[in-house]
Amino acid sequence: MLPPDNISDKELWIQLSKTDRPWKIIDMPDTSRFKLPDGSPAPCAIRILTGEEIQECIFSAEKYVQDAYKRLKIDIPKRDDFSDSYRTALDNREFVEILYRACRNPEDIKKPFFVTGVNSIAKVLTNQEIIVIYNEYLILQNELGPIVNKMEAGEMNIWIEKLARGGTAYFLGSLSAQAQTKLIQYMACQLTRLQTDKSSATLPQEENIND
């Protein structure tokens, strides 16, 4: 659908910027600690973060880990010499930072789900529970995001037809690296099959060979 003609580019961008980000309701991990009085799992709203929010998660995670190293009086490794333990600590903290910003109150997504702050997440949740919720975030990102990760044969044929019609292939940017690889492999198989069929059609018939 094309934008209305009676609106300026600036006004259009302002309206688009106000559009709510994708979100959905998920269940907290299936443990007794996260059950409601009626026995059902506690609901949590989870939403996609912006690029700026992800950067905040990365910077906050790095600062947290570095402060922890200083408290323990351990030398902070240089970026080119990160140890496995440092990388693990950094990754784990990034998960926590992302969950704090992505998990929202299901009755008001403007409010955080973890009302006691980001540090309370790692103190209350186990590593497995954090991973389960983080995986829900990744699933939401794949389901509602613009990146295409999986394609069936029919969908790939449509992409091939778009490429064959000419013009730019800018829309390939909406495919993940995995989906692009699969599309290329599918195109190669189609081309090989076509060449094989043509070769078979040009071979002499058996009765002609015997003449």
Image (cartoon, rainbow, N blue to C red):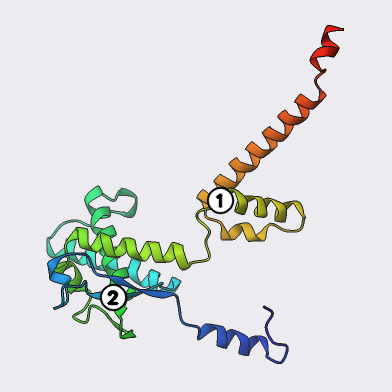
Give the amino acid type for the residue marked by disc 1 in the picture. Glu
Element at label 2: strand
* Quadrant hosting residue 99: bottom left
Q: Measured from the top left, where is residue 32 in percent x and y?
A: 13, 67
Name the residue carrying label 2.
44
Q: Measured from the top left, where is residue 45 in percent x and y?
A: 32, 76
Question: What residue occupies the far top of the structure in this picture?
Answer: 210
The reply, left or right, for residue 171 in relation to residue 204 is left
Query: Residue 41 bears which disc, if any?
Result: none
Q: Quadrant of the C terminus?
A: top right
Give the CA separation, mark 2 to mark 1.
Answer: 32 Å
* Quadrant hosting residue 132: bottom left
Q: Measured from the top left, where is residue 85 in percent x and y?
A: 22, 51
* Quadrant hosting residue 169: bottom right
Q: Is residue 203 above or below residue 102?
A: above
Tell me what residue is drawn at x 45 percent, y 64 percent: 143
Tell me what residue is drawn at x 20 percent, y 71 percent: 121
Please rate how many residues cluster around mark 1, counting C-alpha atoms within 10 Å: few if below 14, some from 14 to 19, many from 20: few
| Depth check, front residue: 65 or 181 | 181
Give the amino acid type for the residue marked by disc 2 in the picture. Cys
Element at label 1: loop
Tell me what residue is drawn at x 40 percent, y 75 percent: 23
**How many callouts does the rendering have?**
2
Query: Residue 152 bears which disc, if any?
Result: 1
